[in-house]
């Protein structure tokens, strides 16, 4: 399953966010496709693969101390 998570940094947490990202331990069941920093909002976008919604949520929860996540399930256009 492919997930897209948009992260809006909490004001005053940018230094902590950088520390978290640099030290992030990605579980073996998560495959990050892209982790992008953006100019403007959202501040970051992560596209990643996870075996199910529960594991995706546990990964995204790693960011809630520094950002407000909005995560969606992605479906390949080829499958539609």
Image (tube, rainbow, N blue to C red):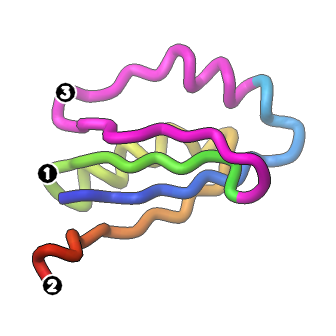
Q: Which residue is drawn at 36% across and 54% down?
A: 57
Q: Is mark 3 on a helix, strand or loop?
A: loop
Q: Is residue 16 left or right of residue 5?
A: right
Which is nearer the N-term, disc 3 or disc 2?
3
Relative depth, front residue between 42 and 13 = 42
- Where is mark 3, residue-wise? 28
Farthest residue to the bottom: give it.
80
State the image quarter where residue 21 is shown. top right
- Label 1 Cα crowd, 10 Å radius (few <14 / some 14-19 / many 20+): few
Give the magenta range: 16-41
C-alpha span from label 3 to label 2: 29 Å
Which is nearer the N-term, disc 2 or disc 1?
1
The answer to whether marks 3 and 1 mark residues whose Cβ atoms lie closer than 8 Å is no
Q: Does the magenta stretch include residue 48?
A: no
C-alpha span from label 2 to label 1: 20 Å
- Where is mark 1, residue-wise? 51
Q: In this view, does 10 lie to the left or right of 19?
A: right
Q: Which residue is drawn at 21% across and 48% down?
A: 50
Which is nearer the N-term, disc 3 or disc 1?
3
Q: Is mark 2 on a helix, strand or loop?
A: loop
- Where is mark 2, residue-wise? 80
State the image quarter where residue 2 is shown. bottom left
x and y percentages locating residue 68 in the rendered image: 65, 56
The answer to whether marks 3 and 2 mark residues whose Cβ atoms lie closer than 8 Å is no
x and y percentages locating residue 51 in the rendered image: 13, 51
- Label 2 Cα crowd, 10 Å radius (few <14 / some 14-19 / many 20+): few
Q: Quadrant of the N terminus?
A: bottom left
x and y percentages locating residue 80 in the rendered image: 15, 84
Q: Is residue 25 magenta?
A: yes
């Amino acid at each position: 399953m492919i997930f897209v998570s948009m992260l809006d940094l909490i004001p005053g947490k940018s230094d902590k966010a950088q520390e978290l990202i640099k030290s992030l331990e990605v579980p073996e069941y998560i495959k990050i496709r892209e982790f992008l920093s953006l100019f403007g909002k959202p501040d970051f976008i992560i596209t990643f693969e996870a075996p199910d919604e529960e594991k995706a949520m546990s990964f995204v929860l790693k960011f809630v101390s520094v950002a407000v996540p909005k995560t969606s399930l992605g479906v390949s256009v080829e499958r539609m």
